[in-house]
Image (cartoon, helix red, strand yellow):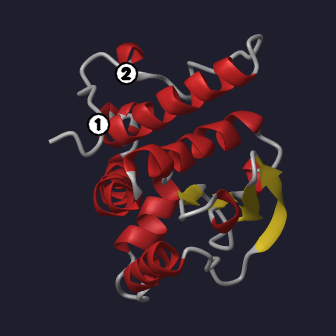
Amino acid sequence: MFNDYVGRSIGQNTQNNGFYLFLDVVVSSWIYGNRAVPGVTRIGTLNGVPLYENPFASGSFTLPASTRDACGIYLQSASINDGDEMKHEFGHILQGEDLGLWCFYTEIAINSTKSARKSGQNGYRHQCYYTETDANSRSKTYYLFTYPDFLWNDDRFPIAPLCPGYEPRTPCSN
């Protein structure tokens, strides 16, 4: 859900109230279901979900809502034409739909942000964290069902069996 830059710039930056901006956006999106991040530019749609350019300059993240047209996938500038990144982020939309918004915002968003902050430290791979591999699995299944000839990029967006040493589990299954 959050890559390394977004995790650090939003989740850690309490000196500039970045953490509170993140909480405000998440809570407002969850409660009202249609509030976009301030300063966004809409760049298109993917499977009925609005795509926006991330106003935080770098990183991609997703905010599921009660309907797809009220959701948002926020892409870093470098990912605006990156279909693989879009499909991964769409997996987080599917998590919100399948597991519920309560699960998404109380477990997935929080734990994904924590994981992103550790990305790259001592060989840690955020892409292999359970919140990310679960999103990848959901998106891969969706696209393979919808487009039988679809090819998923397992190197960039692995599913759990491709991540030895990382805990494979379903969010909110405890």
User: Who comes first in sequence, dot 1 or dot 2?
Assistant: 1
Q: Amino acid at mark 1?
A: Asn
**Tag 1 residue:** 122
| Mark 1: secondary structure | helix
Residue 144 locus on image (x, y percent) = 66, 18
Compare residues 38 and 71 and report the one nearer the observer. Answer: 71
Question: Does residue 19 appear left or right of residue 38 in this picture?
Answer: left
Residue 40 locus on image (x, y percent) = 73, 76
Residue at 39% x, 54% y is 100
130 in relation to 117, above or below: above
Residue 13 locus on image (x, y percent) = 39, 77
Kindly give the residue lying farthest to the bottom in the view shown.
16
Query: Would you say residue 127 is visible in this rendering?
Result: no
Query: Would you say residue 9 is visible in this rendering?
Result: yes
Question: Does residue 122 appear left or right of residue 112 in this picture?
Answer: left
Kindly give the residue lying farthest to the left in the view shown.
174
**Tag 2 residue:** 160
38 in relation to 79, above or below: below
Query: Which quadrant would the C terminus be assigned to in this image?
Result: top left
Residue at 59% x, 25% y is 140
